[in-house]
Structures are given as structure tokens and as C-alpha cells.
Amino acid sequence: MVKQTGSGLHYFSRGFSLIFTPGIRRFVIIPLIINILLLGVTFYFALTRIGEWVDGQLAQLPTWLDWLSYPLWVLIALGLLVVCTYFFSTIANWIAAPFNGLLAEHLEARLTNTRPPDDGVLDIVKDLPRVMKREWQKLWYYLPKAIGLLILFFIPAIGQTLGPVLWFLFTAWMMSVQYCDYAFDNHRVPFATMKGALKEEKGVTFGFGALVTLLTMTPVLNLIVMPAAVCGATLMWVERYKGNFGRY
């Protein structure tokens, strides 16, 4: 499990270098611009409101837990930041989905020494219904679990202690699902099949997703997280899943 987690971290770090690959950089530009704009809004929104949100959560603690106020302030603030980060990342990924799929497609061709697809603008437009249908699948998979975790936040003591930890783990899983799905979807692998493949290698999945989550919350580095995560996840597809995905 530890080795697998390290592999997940390694894939993401290699994704950073891949965004500068000649012939690939032009497919990075649009996702990069979308990510910069949306994350700028995220951090402005979060940093101007987070103190108020955390104080509201701490007000629900029973008096005998007052001594935990300071460590819980940090824990709850991080949990709320994770929630905001994933929310705005989801919006960014919706907007950038066609371009992320294109980036994954061309990078895979480069990694496997095959001819890249020769898709024009019309081909991309024709493919939009399928791409957006897949994004809806991810959203409906995400929403019930997210709502359940949000309800947990309102349970005194339990919500303030377990809530942020569970949110982080859930977000790490969803980050892997989000970014790995582009390569799987390019090959028309069903969403349920893709989830099964990721669950079989939980260490890699959570290691990759955890690093994506942490760096998405890190100023400056978060600006290039989206294209780097797409590249890292595509590399993971080529090296771990492409040859045997049909068995899932």
C-alpha cells in the first residue's frame, strides 16, 4: 500500500514535467487559463469568508471541548478550504473537459509513439455531448456522498473532528476519478468500469489524488495543477491500465 501510494505521488510529479513536452504545450494553454481564473476566484472567496465559517462551526462545540478550539480552528479551516477548492475545481473541469480530453489524447499518442488524432474544431464540437454526459456521471456520483459529508459537519464534536479528515480523503478519491477519467473516456471505457480499475489500486489512486488536492490548495503551484494532473493521470493510464483495462 505504501509503495502504491508512492507511485501515485510519482505519477503526478512526472505530470508536471510532461506539460512542457514539445508538441503538448499548446494543448495545455486553455486548461491553464481556465484553472488560473477559477482558482483566483476560489482563493478570494475562501480567504474573505473562512474566518466567519470557522467561528460558526466552533460555536457548535460543547463547552467541555473549548480547550480544542485552537487545533480545531486549523483543522476546520483546512477542511473548508478543501471543500471550496474541490467545488471550484469541479466547475473548472466542467469548462475545460473537452480540452483536457484533447490534452490526454495527444499526450497518450506521444507516450506510445503512435500517430496523434487529427481532430478539427468540428470534431471537438461533435464530441461535446459525450464528454458532457460523462461529466454529469461524475457529478451524480459525487453529489450524494458530498451531501452526506456536509450533513456530518453539522453534528457537534463529530463533524468538527472527523468531518475535515473524511472530506480530504473523499476529495483525494474524487480528484483521481476526475483526472484519470479523461484517458479512460477517450477509449470509451464505461464510468463504472473505470472506478473499478481505480479501486483495485487504492494506494496509487489515493496517493495521486491526495497530492493533487494538497497542491490545489497551494498558492502559485495550484495554477498549473489541472494540466499537470491530466498529464500525470494519462501517464498512469498508459503504464498501468491501457494494456489490460478490458479485464475490469
Image (spheres, helix red, strand yellow):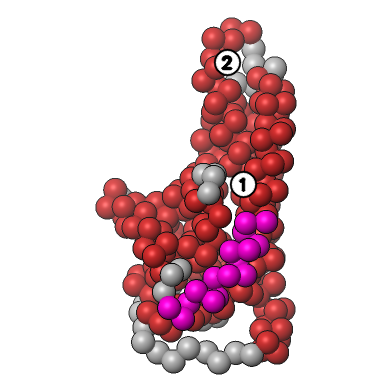
Residue 149, given in percent of the width and then of the height, sits at 63, 40
How packed mark 2 is, by other alpha carbons closer than 10 Å (few <14, some 14-19, many 20 or more), is some
Q: Is residue 234 above or below residue 209?
A: below
Between the residue at mark 2 and the residue at mark 1, the CA separation in whole angstroms equals: 24 Å
| Residues rendered magenta in the picture | 22-37
Q: Residue at x 27, y 52 (%)?
A: 3
Q: Which residue bears the numbered disc 1?
A: 85
Q: Is residue 214 visible?
A: yes
Residue 195, given in percent of the width and then of the height, sits at 50, 63
How packed mark 1 is, by other alpha carbons closer than 10 Å (few <14, some 14-19, many 20 or more), is many
Residue 92, given in percent of the width and then of the height, sits at 66, 60
113 with respect to 38 (left or right) = left
Q: Main secondary structure of the magenta part?
A: helix
Q: Amino acid at mark 1?
A: Thr
Q: Residue 4 magenta-drawn? A: no
Q: Which residue bears the numbered disc 2?
A: 69
Please report whichever mark, 2 or 1, sits nearer to the chain's N-terminal start.
2
Q: Residue at x 45, y 48 (%)?
A: 210
Q: Amino acid at mark 2?
A: Ser
Q: Are marks 2 and 1 in contact (CB under 8 Å)?
A: no
Label 2 residue SS: helix
Residue 172, given in percent of the width and then of the height, sits at 50, 49
Splitting the image into 4 quarters, where does residue 114 fall? bottom left
